[in-house]
Structure formats: C-alpha cells, structure tokens
Amino acid sequence: MSALDRVVKPKTRRAKRFLEHRGPKLTENDKSTMLIKGGNASNTVTQALKDLHALKKPSCVLYKKKNMTRPFEDQTSVEFFSKKSDCSLFVFGSHNKKRPNNLIFGRMYDFHVLDMVELGMEKYVSLKEFKNCKCPEATKPLLIFAGDAFEMNEDYKRLKSLMIDFFRGPTVSGIRLAGLEHILHFTAVGGKIYMRSYKVLMKKSGCRTPRIELEEMGPSFDFVMRRTHLASDDLYKLSLKRPKALQAKKKKNISHDTFGTKYGRIHMQKQDLGKLQTRKVRALKKRPAEKIAKASEDGTPKRRKAIE
C-alpha cells in the first residue's frame, strides 16, 4: 500500500478541509488534466503538450520532467500522479521508432485508468506558427464532430466521449453571444482524425445578428488511431451512475414533446351545468309568478315587506 492509499486521519482543520475537498460530493469539481512527458519525447511531442496546456488553462498541470513509464504496460505511475495532483484526465507524450510522435489521451475513475486511446501525430502545426490573435485563456470551446465513424465504430464513439470530457471546460449556467469565440472541429474520414481549432470573428451584417467568419488559429493535428484500452461495459456504466439526490423526480401528468414544449394533464370532476353561472341579462330575469311557484315548491313562506 502506497502512502497515498492509506487511510489518513486529519490532525488539523486545514488537513480536514483538504480531505473533504478530495472526497466524493454530490456535485463534483471541474475535471483537471495532467500532461506528462515520456522518457523519449521529441521536440514535436513537447511542443504539442505545451499547446494542449495553453488550450486547457487554468485547469491543467504540465510536468516538465521526463518520466520513464509506459501506460499501456504499467498504469501505476499514471494513477499515482493522478491521485497526487487530483487530476482525472491525462495526456502522455512519447516518441520511439515503432510509434513516432505519440499522444495517449486517457481518463480516470476513482483514480484508476478507465479509458486510454493512443493517437499518432502524422502532421502537426503548432499554435505559434499561426500569426494571428488567439482566444483568451479559459475560453469554453464549441465542439463539432463530423464523420460517420463517430456514430458507427465503437472505438471512435469512446474517443468522441473522451474528447468531449477533455475539452468541455467548466459547467456554466448561461453563455453570452460574445463568449462564443472558440471552435474545435474533429473530422473522422479515411481512418484518420483531423483536429482543427478556429477563432470566431463577428463581422458587421447590417442587422442585429452579426456575420460569422472562422479563422484558424491552431494548433492543427492529423491523428491516426493506434492502440486502445477501453473499460468494460459494466465498469463504464458504473462510472456514469448519478447519485439519487441528483436524479430528477418524475412528475405525474406532465410530458414534453420533441421541441421541449411542456404539456400538463388536468383531472376535473363532472360539472353540474344546472349550477353554471351565466351572464346576467334582463331577458333571463325570473318573473314574480315564477318566484312564488318556486317558493311554494321549496316549502318556504313568502316574505312580506314590512310597512312602517
């Protein structure tokens, strides 16, 4: 058992707050990412890790020292770093003759490796090679996935889920139009994955809605899928389980259509139309003879006006 696995009893309030921050919660913290450089990382891999760090700031940790580990053969080092830095996402960069310019994207569940996908960089254009303005730090990107492989192939489906988990950013309650200025586009065609990053430019259009133009700002990747390490269906289903306190309670007699319109069903008792209040007009006013007949039927004596 490692030092991080043993049960720790806090002795100070600061240590207690630290353990409560690390412990399970109903609403989890935003996921952080660690970028790890392998023992034989090339300059291309090092620059790619720096560009990914620039896209993921500030919820990202970049390890600058080289680490002699192989995640597909031994996962203990990656799990140790995950627990130490409290990161549930990671990217491991390596380079060798058999697998040049290699990036391994992965995620954790309970500080154990859940999914890993190994992608090889066949073509790479760094962020600094695009001589234009960049998006501000911590900008939440729009994610677009194109290609039938993301819907048909099981490995590509899991890769799509991993990329959404990796680049989605913090959860927000609302987004303003000016905040939509970064787009990440993934295209799967011909056994390759093309990743492009664009900056949204809002031009004048003569009306209230601006005219949108896209300008590539980098980085640009041409990936090819190599090895995969995917969780079993049972483990993957367990990782998606939500606490009962967060599950929406089903409301009776309420339904929604395809467009999100809310419909409610109301149950009413049978209505007596004889007691229905109608509009009071002079033509429907009862005559004195009708009032006397009704009073005699009810058995109530007729009231006489007092004479003073």
Image (tube, rainbow, N blue to C red):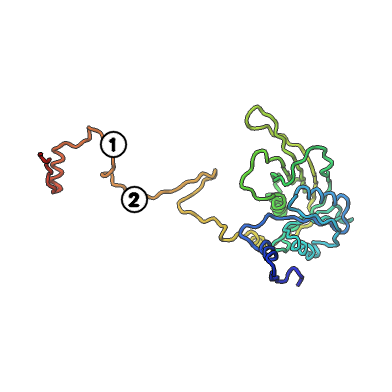
Residue 162 rendering spot, x and y as whole percentages: 71, 53
Estimate the spatial distance between the alpha carbons at disc 2 and disc 1, rounded to whole Å.
23 Å
| Residue 112, placed above or below residue 58 | below
Q: How many marks?
A: 2
Which of these two is toward me, 111 or 8?
8
| Residue 244, placed above or below residue 174 | below
Residue sitting at x 72%, y 42%: 183
Residue 92 rendering spot, x and y as whole percentages: 80, 56
Outermost bottom residue = 1
Q: Characterize the local packing of mark 2: few (<14), some (14-19) or many (20 or more) Cα atoms within 10 angstroms.
A: few
Tag of residue 279: 1
Residue 174 rendering spot, x and y as whole percentages: 62, 45
Q: Amino acid at mark 1?
A: Arg
- Residue at label 2? 269
Decide if residue 88 is in sight here: yes
Q: Amino acid at mark 2?
A: Gln
Check the picture and name the quadrant holding the N terminus: bottom right
> As drawn, is 85 to the left or to the right of 300?
right
Which of these two is toward me, 275 or 134?
134
Residue sitting at x 74%, y 43%: 136
Numbered disc 1: secondary structure: loop
Tell me which label, 2 or 1, sits earlier in the chain.
2
> As drawn, is 176 to the left or to the right of 287?
right
Decide if residue 153 is in sight here: no
